[in-house]
Image (spheres, rainbow, N blue to C red):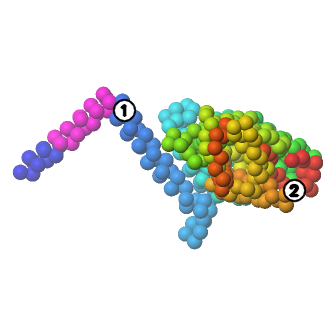
Amino acid sequence: MINKITKYIVLFIMLVIVITTASLTFSADLRRYIFFRVIVVHDFYQLKSLVKYVEGGRRHVKDFSAASDKLLKYIEISKLLSDGKSGMWNGIYNAVDYVTLRATTQKEFNQLEKVFLSLVELDPNLYKARIWLARAISDTDYKGSLTHIEKAIEILPAGEDAYREAIRILQDKNDTKLAQKFCDKYLKAQLGGYMPLDGGNFFGASGIRKMAVEFIPENKDPAFYPNSGIQLNKFQNYEFIPSYPLTMNGINVYLSSLPGIRVYIKEIAIYLSGEMLVIPIQNFTITSKFAYIEEDNDNNLSFIMVNGKNEVLRFRNEKTFKSVDKITIGMNFTKMKLVNNLLCEDAKE
């Protein structure tokens, strides 16, 4: 009886193996599905296994050297799948980002140096990796760290992280002259953007050049009218023309701005039936998705962008305007300064 049961179990196992092997052999979709699910589970395990090394607390002591070893092994495993970036790349980046966000001292960054160097070797155009590596070597290779900063700025000229790190390094070196050059360059830089790993960006990437307007009340099929001509540091009338004359009592302005942008708005001009109505901005009720709102003594409004996420500025008026065929919005986009005037006293906003 026992031998018969054993025989059935062996036959069942063999049958499962045969069916699984056949399925994987003839179904590319199944192979791909299983492969990516295995990677997801592995990435989750790797991330969770790093917690004890970097969170600290009563149960654990922070050990960035051990975290570095763990990350380097993670990277080596990924290289078995591909010489360059593999399907594990996003998991590796998230894990390194998780650890780096918890590093505060120069010693901790020194202990992660080999990890950052490995990332740069895998992808020389990885913006954050260049900045992380610059921080790690800033105490031992001052000029080399600035070289990595310059490369990061080439990759993303308008991003703030590279400039912040450069100015931090130069502050420690008491090199205010070079720090001012980075400050000026940052305030004028407008090109470049980045795509969040989770996607979902209005314009494909966060940047400074693009915005769009939606007229309110919205139609059953809402239309968005873009403008890609944003210019820094000057008031300009940005024009939006609907496909046909419409009725409106407000607008939504959509932005995917980089953080640290201040948007000044004076007025909105509404064109209808050959007539232009200029409405001061204080005549609108205004809300936003994330931005903070300031009002100056002249009742002009400014919006402070605090992150690189999708932003919506909502303007509503108590009146309804009919046959609107164009609007213009008087706006000025500026970058907020990263440091005080004592370090960058010649920087111009």
**For mark 2, what is the residue?**
340
- Main SS type for the magenta part? helix
Query: Which residue is at the front of the view, 311 or 252?
Result: 252
In the image, 79: left or right of 205? left
Residue at x 55% of width, y 69% of height: 59
SS category of the residue bearing label 1: helix
Residue flagged by tag 1: what amino acid is it? Answer: Asp
Q: Position of residue 250 (x, y in %)?
A: 65, 49
Residue at x 72% of width, y 43% of height: 270
**For mark 1, what is the residue?**
29
Evaluate if marks 2 and 1 touch, with contact meaning CB atoms under 8 Å apart.
no
Does residue 82 appear anywhere in the picture? yes
Residue at x 23% of width, y 34% of height: 18
Q: Tell me, yes or no, whether the highlighted magenta stretch contains residue 1.
A: no
Q: Which of marks 2 and 1 is in front?
A: 2
Does residue 149 appear anywhere in the picture? no
Question: Does residue 259 lie above or below 127 as drawn?
Answer: below
- Highlighted magenta segment, given as a residue range: 11-27
Q: Point out which mark residue 105 bears.
A: none
In the image, 17: left or right of 76? left
In the image, 327: left or right of 332? left
Question: Does residue 133 lie above or below 229 as drawn?
Answer: below
Q: Where is residue 42 in the image (x, y as percent from the top left)?
A: 46, 47
Q: Position of residue 62 (x, y in %)?
A: 62, 62
